[in-house]
Image: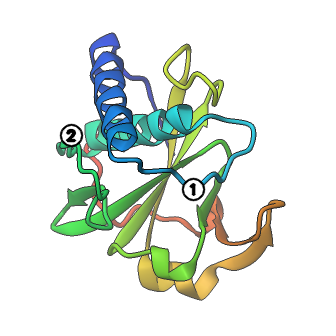
């Protein structure tokens, strides 16, 4: 586990990216699936991208800051030649909405420590570790948070197979 604090420049860059992405979605009538009734799509998108920035900083890789109307290719980062999905949450559990949505080689769990409605203000990010797709499918369990079954694993199932620069 490592706590990552982002700089003002990193946060401002993330804000610019998410604002451009939200503008593109609106322009093309793309509607996000709502998985957090207590939050806005903007804040959910920002929290997710800030989590990607925190992981990219820790593993010394670049984020993909291209605005893509159709979304990403099923992964957020490439680390050690492996595709990685960064899952940012307010919990210390790694959650996928469906098993088939784990489309990368690995997932990394990032927990927002702060206000999920304003993830860019007085927050930091806790990276719990990584898990391969195969191991996740082995250890995950079903959980219903009130909006349907999700597939979950606990932070204790995560490891550090990918080589982080600062862990």
Residues at discs 1 and 2 in contact (Cβ within 8 Å): no
Left or right: residue 79 compared with residue 2: left
Q: Give the residue displayed 32% in from the left and 37% down from the top.
A: 21
* Mark 1 surroundings: few (<14), some (14-19) or many (≥20) residues within 10 A: few
Residue at which label 2 appears: 65
Left or right: residue 38 compared with residue 56: right
Q: Secondary structure at mark 1?
A: loop
- Picture layout, residue 70 above or below residue 117: below
- Picture layout, residue 151 above or below residue 137: above
In the foreground, 32 or 62: 32
Residue 130 position, x and y percent, is 44, 62
Residue at which label 1 appears: 33
Q: Give the residue displayed 38% in from the left and 22% down from the top.
A: 6
* Mark 2 surroundings: few (<14), some (14-19) or many (≥20) residues within 10 A: some
- Which of disc 2 and disc 1 is earlier in sequence? 1
- Picture layout, residue 90 above or below residue 15: below
How are the residues colored? rainbow
Q: Give the residue displayed 43% in from the left and 79% down from the top.
A: 133
Residue 70 position, x and y percent, is 29, 58
Q: Secondary structure at mark 2?
A: loop
In the foreground, 39 or 4: 39
Residue 115 position, x and y percent, is 65, 24
């Amino acid at each position: 586990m490592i706590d990552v604090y982002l700089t003002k420049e990193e946060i401002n860059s993330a804000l610019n990216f998410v604002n451009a992405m939200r503008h593109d979605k609106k322009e093309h009538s793309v509607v996000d699936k709502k998985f957090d009734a207590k939050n806005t799509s903007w804040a959910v998108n920002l929290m997710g991208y800030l989590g990607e920035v925190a992981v990219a900083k820790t593993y010394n890789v670049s984020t993909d800051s291209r605005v893509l109307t159709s979304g990403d290719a099923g992964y957020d980062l490439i680390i050690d030649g492996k595709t990685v999905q960064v899952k940012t949450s307010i919990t210390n559990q790694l959650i996928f909405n469906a098993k088939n949505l784990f489309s990368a080689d690995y997932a990394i769990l990032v927990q927002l420590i702060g206000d999920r409605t304003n993830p860019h203000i007085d927050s930091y990010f806790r990276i719990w570790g990584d898990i391969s797709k195969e191991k996740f499918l082995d250890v995950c369990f079903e959980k219903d948070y009130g909006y349907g079954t999700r597939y979950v694993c606990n932070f204790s199932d995560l490891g550090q197979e990918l080589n982080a620069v600062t862990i």
